[in-house]
Amino acid sequence: MESSNPVLNRYNRRGYASMGNSNVGTTGFSTSYDANEGGQLEDLYNAPAASSMRTGRMTMDDVVTRTGILFAILMVTGGFAWKSNFGSGTLIGSLLGATALGLVISFSRKVRPALILAYAALEGIVLGTISAAYESAYPGIISQALIATAVAFVGVLFAYRSGKISITARATKIATGAIIGYLILGVINMIGGNFIFNGTFGPLVAVFGVGLATFFLAMDFDQAAKAAAMGVPQEESWRVGFGLMVSVVWLYLEVLRLLSILRNDR
C-alpha cells in the first residue's frame, strides 16, 4: 500500500512491503535493505528543527530575545542615571539624542541594531533621571508605576493571545488619529504652561494617555505576530523589539503621570 509520505514509500518498497517473503531475515527486514539508507533516515530524524539561524526568518523567540536585550540595557543605564542624580542638562541632551535616533530608526529602510541599542541606552538615562525626580517628589511612586505597567503589559498580552483584543484596520486608523490629536494637545499644553495635563481635565487626559499607550502596545503584539507569520528577515526582530520598548516606556510614563496627579488630588 502506497503512502503519501515519500520516506514511508521508499521504506515500504524496500523493507516493510517485503515482510513475509522467503528472503526476510530474523529482524523482519528484507535482505535487500540498504544500511546506508537507514543511516540517512536516522540523520533526518536527528537533525535539529529549522530555526531562524538556519532559515534567516524572524521567529517570536528572536523578538523575545532582542526585546529582552534592549530592556536589559535600558535598566542598566536607567539605574546608573538614578544613582548619579543627573541634572537637567543631561536629561535634555539624552532626550534629544534619543528622539533623533528614534526618528532615524523609524524611517530607515535598513535595520540598524547599533542605533537601536544606543537608543535603549539613552532612553534608560532619560527614564532614570525622570524616575528619580518623581520618586523625590512622591516617595514610593516608582514601584507603583512599575507594578502597574507590568500588570498592564501582562494583561494586554493575555487579552491579545486569547482573542479578546482584535486589531482591525478601522481601530488602527482611529488610534493613529488619536495619537496625532494627543501630540497636538501636548504641544498646546507646553505652550500654555501645562494647564491641560495638570489642570481640571488632567486626570481624564492622563487616563486617555494610559489607554492609548495600552492599545498601541496591543498593536505592537499584533505586528510582531504577523511579521513572524509572514517570515520577514531575522534582523527585523530588532525593529519589533524597538517598537515594543517604546510602547512600554510610553505606558510607564503615562502611568507615572496619572499616579502623580492622583496624589496631588488627595
Image (cartoon, rainbow, N blue to C red):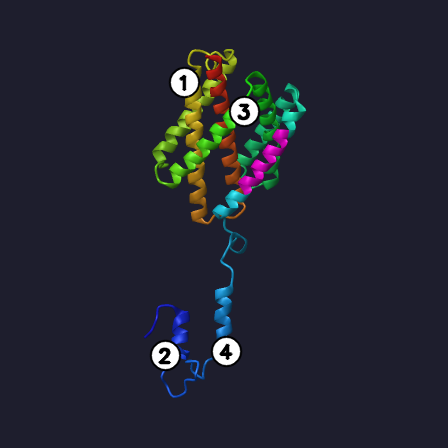
Quarter of the rendering occupied by the N terminus:
bottom left
Three-letter code, disc 4: Ala
Q: Which residue is mark 2?
A: 17
**N-terminal label among 2 and 3:** 2
Q: Residue furthest bottom?
A: 22
Q: Which residues are magenta?
A: 66-79
Q: Is residue 50 visible?
A: yes
Crowding at dot 1, Cα within 10 Å, few <14 / some 14-19 / many 20+, comes out as some
Say above or below: 241 vs 87.
Answer: below
What residue sits right under mark 1 in the picture? 204
Q: Distance of mark 1 from mark 3, alpha carbons?
A: 21 Å
Q: Which mark is residue 35?
A: 4
Task: State the separation of the CA atoms marked 2 and 4.
Answer: 17 Å
Question: Which residue ends up furthest to the right in the rendered image?
Answer: 84
Question: Is residue 78 highlighted in magenta?
Answer: yes
Residue in the foreground of this view, choosing between 56 and 261: 261
Q: Amino acid at mark 2?
A: Ala
Q: Earlier in the sequence, mark 4 or mark 3?
A: 4
How many residues crowd around disc 2 within 10 Å: few (fewer than 14), some, or many (20 or more)?
Answer: some
Which residue: 45% across, 47% down? 228
Where does the image place residue 206, in percent across and percent down from the top left?
44, 20
Checking the image for residue 142, the label placed there is 3
Dot 1: what SS? helix
Q: Are marks 1 and 4 in contact (CB under 8 Å)?
A: no
| Element at label 2 | helix
Most common SS among magenta residues: helix
Q: Of callouts 2 and 4, which one flags the residue occurring earlier in the amino acid sequence?
A: 2
